[in-house]
Image: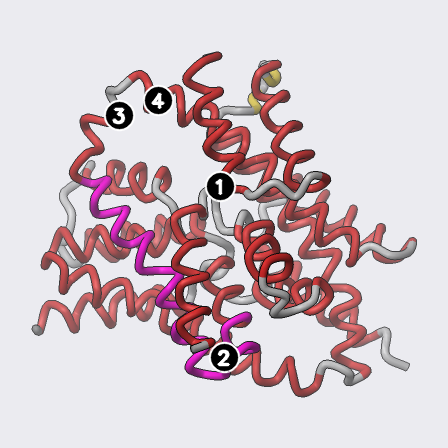
Amino acid sequence: MKVFNIFFTFLKISPLIFGGGYVVIPLIESEIVKKKNWITEEQLVDIFAVAGCMPGAVAFNIAVLVGYKLAGILGAVVALLGIIIPSCIIVIVILYFFSYMSNNIFFIKALQGLKPAIVGLIAAAGFKVARIAITDISTISVFLIGLLILIFTNINPVLLILAGIFLGLSLVK
Amino acid sequence: MWINLKLFFTFLKLGLVSFGGGYAMLPLIEHQAQNNGWLKTGEFGEIMTIAGVSSGSIAENSAVLIGYNVNNISGAVFSGLGMVLPAFTLAVVLGSLLYRIKNNEFVKKVFYILKPIIVSLILYAALKFAIINEIISLSGIGFNNILIIAVSFIMVTYFKIHPALIFLTASITGMLIF
C-alpha cells in the first residue's frame, strides 16, 4: 500500500517541476514532510546534498533517494516512475501544441509570470537548505566562496563538489 | 527494435556523463543526435525550447522528444529509460550507503562541507535560470519581476503555500500585468 502511495505522491509532484529540478525541494517538503510525515527535514537535507552531487536530474535523484529510504528498491523504482511519467507525457503533448502555444499571447504572458515565480521558488529551496547547512563561520565561508567561484569562473560544478569532499575528509582528525 | 536499442544505449551513455545539470548536457545530446542522423539542423533548437518550457528535466525531456521523433512512443520510452538508468542506479547505491554509514565521522565531515556547497549550487541555479530567461539582464530587473520573485519566495518560505498554488497565481498575474 505504501508503495502505491509513494508512486502517486511523486506522480502529483512531477507536472510541477519547472526550472531545473530544485523546485522539487519545496514540493517534496509540502507533500512528504508536512502532509505525510514520512521523513524529517534533517533527513531531507542530507538527501538534497547527495542528490546535488550526483549525475542526472536533481529532481529525479531526490525522488529515487526518498523512495529508497521509504521502501527500498521497490520504493526507488516507483518514485522514479512517478516522477518521470507525467512530465514525459506532457512534453510530447506540448510538442503538438507548441506552434499554437508559442503564438498565443495569453500563454506567453502566463509564462512571463511563471518564470520569476520559479526563480523565487529555487531561491526558497536554497534558503531552506541554508538554514540547516550554514551553521557557523566556516560553512558561511564555504558557501560564499562556492557561489563566487560558480559566478565568476566557468568550472564544472563537479569539480567544486570534489573539492568539497576532499576538504571535508581533510577535516577528520 | 534495433533502433530502440540504439536509442537506449546512446542515451544510456549520455546519462552516465550527465554531470553539471541539464543545460550543460544539451550540446552533447545535440552532437549525438546529429551524428546518428536523428535530427535535421535547426530541429534541435525547437526540441530544446519545448524541453525547457515543459515540466521535468530538460535532458530527460530532450531524450524523450528525440526518441519520439525517431520511433514514436517506443522510441520515447527507450530513450527516456536510457537517460535515467545510470543516475537511478547510482542513487540506489549511494542511498543504501548513506542510510547505513550516516554517522561515520568521515561522512559527517564531508556533509558538513558539502551542504553549504549545495546551497551555492542552488542559488546559482536560480541566478542562471533568471539570466537564461532574461528576467535579469545587464539593463537590470523589472519591478514586476522583483515583485513576483519576492512574493513567491515569502509565500513558500514563511506561509508554506503549496508551490502549485504559487505557480497558478503567478501565471494568472502574468496574464494580467505583462
Q: CA distance from mark 1 to mark 2?
A: 28 Å
Q: Residue at x 48, y 47 (%)?
A: A20
Position of A124 with respect to A69 (left or right) is: right
Residue shown at the point (19%, 28%) measured from the top left:
A99
Task: Say if labels 1 and 2 share a chain.
Answer: yes
Question: Which residue in the protein does label 4 denote?
Answer: A108
Mark 3–mark 2 Cα distance, whole angstroms, equals 39 Å
Type of amino acid under label 1: Ala
| Region in magenta | A66-95
Identify the amino acid type marked 2: Val
Numbered label attached to residue B164: 1
Question: Is residue A165 highlighted in magenta?
Answer: no
Q: Are marks 3 and 4 in contact (CB under 8 Å)?
A: yes
Measured in 3D between alpha carbons, the distance from the residue under mark 1 to the one under mark 4, in whole angstroms, is 19 Å
User: Label 3: chain?
Assistant: A
- Mark 2–mark 4 distance (CA, rounded to whole Å): 39 Å
Q: Chain of mark 4?
A: A
Badge 1 element:
helix
| Residues flagged by tags 1 and 4 on a common chain | no
Q: Which element carries disc 4, helix, strand or loop?
A: helix
Residue at 47% across, 42% down:
A19
Residue A73 colored in magenta in the image: yes
Q: Residues within 10 Å of mark 1 (few under 14, many from 20)?
A: some
Instruction: Name the residue tied to disc 3.
Output: A102
Q: Are marks 2 and 4 in contact (CB under 8 Å)?
A: no
Kind of residue at disc 4: Ile
Q: Residue visible at 14% across and 43% down?
A: B40
- Three-letter code for the amino acid on which mark 3 is drawn: Ser
- For label 2, the residue is B92
Chain holding disc 2: B
Residue A117, image x and y in percent? 54, 32
Which sits in the foreground, B154 or B5? B154
